Image (cartoon, coloured by chain):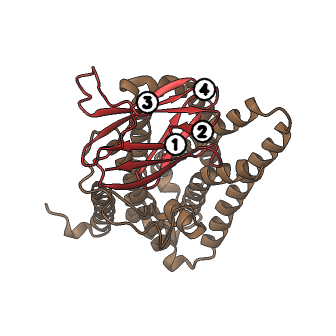
Chain colours: A brown, B red
Amino acid sequence: MLGASIIVLRETLEAALLIGILAAATRSIAGRGLWIGGGILAGLIGAGVVAALTGHIAALFEGLGQEYFNAAILAVAVVLLGSHQVWMSAHAGELVTDARQIGMEVREGRRQLSAILILIGLTVLREGSESSLFLYGLLSESQSGSSSILLGGAMGLLAGVALGGLLYAGMLRIPMRWFFSVTGLLIVLLAAGMASRMTRFLIQADLLPSLRSPLWDTSSALPIDSIPGALLNTLAGYDPAPAGMQVVFYVATLLIILAGSMWVQHPSARPV
Amino acid sequence: MRFLIPALVFVSASTLCMAAEPEVSLVIRDHRFIPAELRVPAGQKIRLMIDNQDATAEEFESHALNREKVIPGKSKLPVLIGPLLPGKYPFFGDFHKKTAIGIVVAE
């Protein structure tokens, strides 16, 4: 039962933290709850479909379908997260001052919310499909305690949701002055971590060279299966033994999003 | 290389033109890896062909090899690893961590 809850917690955590951060970041956009809920629901349905199709997906591209699939989902997520962050930077001023009424931005806000729906849906799908495969395997071969497995899974899910909720509640307490800097930083780190994970799948599929692997190894100092290691992995893409190419993509993602955010904040600096 | 155990490890040139790398096979049965120790040549890419003979899925995972891949039940999938420096690289089955344990020894 404990094993089931730990695996489900680990898979839930990333989606829960992402949802917590995005829910906080879009706090002033009207009607966001519906879009976030829709994203979660779509993701859960997608997770079931993907879990059922795992064998078929994996068999594509001479057995490398899973790598391509994960890399593609992560790539879309990185682009959405990055462009969302740039949009937030461009509108941070309005989002702070008219925290309650940004009627003029409704149309644009809605476009952002649909991007968030896709983003949340894809993340829930990716993390959820693995959980459901694992639980399905456990259930199909256990003679007795299927209820204890389901209970374990539910506990893991609840713990993940609770941590996401905690992060959300904590972020709402941040003074408005720093609020968008904090959400921005978290979103940029999340995106860079996803880019690094995407790169790992592309290396695994032999589409990218690893450029020295590992570039460094901190797995004895901060193992990824320790609690701080796992949290850092989820929030900031911490990898104890990354390939050089992962670090290249991580840093490039950070720089591109930061540069984009700065560029939209200082339109006077735009080259004509 | 001197310790290659032919009965356990099959290194063969694959017929696929894409796959110039040597292929090593690894079986999952009763949530265990067979063989639990794989000896592979260092310094080149290896195609680990994982044959999951169980009815349920397993996730082949290794922090040392930086690899992670779900192998559905009753299916056979490749995992490309390396080129590796000489050394030991533990791996495990994430869905059955207690029994599914193994190690790649590059030499």
Q: Is residue B72 above or below residue A216?
A: above
Amino acid carrying label 4: it is Ala
Which residue is painted at 55% across and 56% down in the image?
A18
**Could you give the CA–CA distance between mark 3 and mark 2, rounded to whole angstroms?**
18 Å
Mark 3: give few (<14), some (14-19) or many (20+) Cα within 10 Å: few
Are dots 3 and 2 in contact, CB under 8 Å?
no
Cβ–Cβ under 8 Å for marks 3 and 1: no
Q: Nearer the viewer, mark 3 or mark 2?
A: 3
Q: Residue at x 39, y 61 (%)?
A: A241
Question: In front of the other: label 4 or label 2?
Answer: 2
Q: CA distance from mark 4 to mark 2?
A: 24 Å
Mark 3 vs mark 2: which is more N-terminal?
A: 3
Image coordinates for residue B34, horizontal then vertical, percent: 53, 36
Kindly report the distance in space between the C-alpha atoms of the residues bearing marks 3 and 4.
Answer: 35 Å
Horizontal and vertical percent position of residue A71: 39, 41
Q: Does label 3 or label 1 sit earlier along the sequence?
A: 3
Q: Which mark is residue A126?
A: none
Q: Which residue is mark 2?
A: B32
Rounded to the nearest angstrom, the CA distance separating label 4 from label 1 is: 29 Å
Chain for disc number 3: B
Where residue A207 sits, quadrant-wise, is top left
The residue beneath circle 3 is B7
Please state which of the two labelled residues, at mark 3 or mark 4, is closer to the viewer. Answer: 3
Q: Nearer the viewer, residue B35 or A119?
A: B35
The residue where tag 1 is placed is B36
Question: Contact, CB < 8 Å: mark 2 with mark 1?
Answer: yes
Query: Mark 2 — on which chain does it sit?
Result: B
Q: Nearer the viewer, mark 2 or mark 1?
A: 1
Label 4 resides on the chain identified as A
> Same chain for marks 4 and 1?
no
How far apart are labels 2 and 1 at the CA level? 8 Å
Answer few, some or many: residues within 10 Å of disc 2's Cα (few below 14, many 20 plus, some between 14 and 19).
many
